[in-house]
Image (spheres, helix red, strand yellow):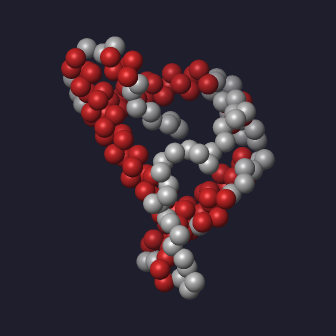
Amino acid sequence: PYVLCPFTEPEVIAQPPIERQHCHKFNKQLSSQRITVEHAIGLWKGHFPSLKDMPPEQDICDTYHVVEVLVALHNLCIDLGDHLQCIPFFENHSTYEDDNGDLDDVDVNGYRGAEDAAIGVELPAWETDKWLREAGQWQQNVILDELFPV
């Protein structure tokens, strides 16, 4: 799995003019997709408001399982035509309007990269932070070439 990041300004500036335009187009397309994903997450938080107050778990595997189950339940609600407004006593304090995309509610203090992610999860030894970063950059370039061939 990869987290697809936009090209940084120094990366864009280092490119020849044609590829610079492609990098800007890539970043714009990625940004529009991110907005769609953030909207979906906002709707998901609307179905399950407890997600906003979910305390950090000690066991990351349990957290992943909870998220997987809630995503499945959310998709079931969508498939079955469940509407939040039809739930008795439902108060729409906000679904995604106050979700400004900032990560204010995420505490990354003490996160040490792959070694923290590996708690309770068996990662291959070669999946270091450096390797993941390089693999992500390679994947970013592959997608750029597919979207905007030179």
In the picture provided, is 18 more to the left or to the right than 31?
left
The relative height of residue 17 versus residue 41 in the rendered view (above or below) is: above
Q: Quadrant of the C terminus?
A: top left
In the picture provided, is 40 more to the left or to the right than 143?
right
The relative height of residue 69 versus residue 122 in the rendered view (above or below) is: below
Residue nearest the viewer, comparing 107 with 132: 107
Residue at image coords 47%, 60%: 96
Q: How many marks?
A: 0
**Furthest residue in direction bottom, as rendered:** 88
**Furthest residue in direction right, as rendered:** 58
Query: Which x, y percent locates residue 79?
Result: 44, 72
Residue at image coords 50%, 66%: 94
The relative height of residue 26 versus residue 51 in the rendered view (above or below) is: above
Residue nearest the viewer, comparing 52 with 63: 52
Picture quarter containing residue 138? top left
Residue at image coords 32%, 17%: 13
On the question of residue 111 being in view, the answer is yes
Query: Which x, y percent locates residue 27?
Result: 34, 34
Picture quarter containing residue 103? top right
On the question of residue 82 being in view, the answer is no
In the picture provided, is 18 more to the left or to the right than 92?
left
Query: Which x, y percent locates residue 38?
Result: 45, 52
Residue at image coords 48%, 28%: 136
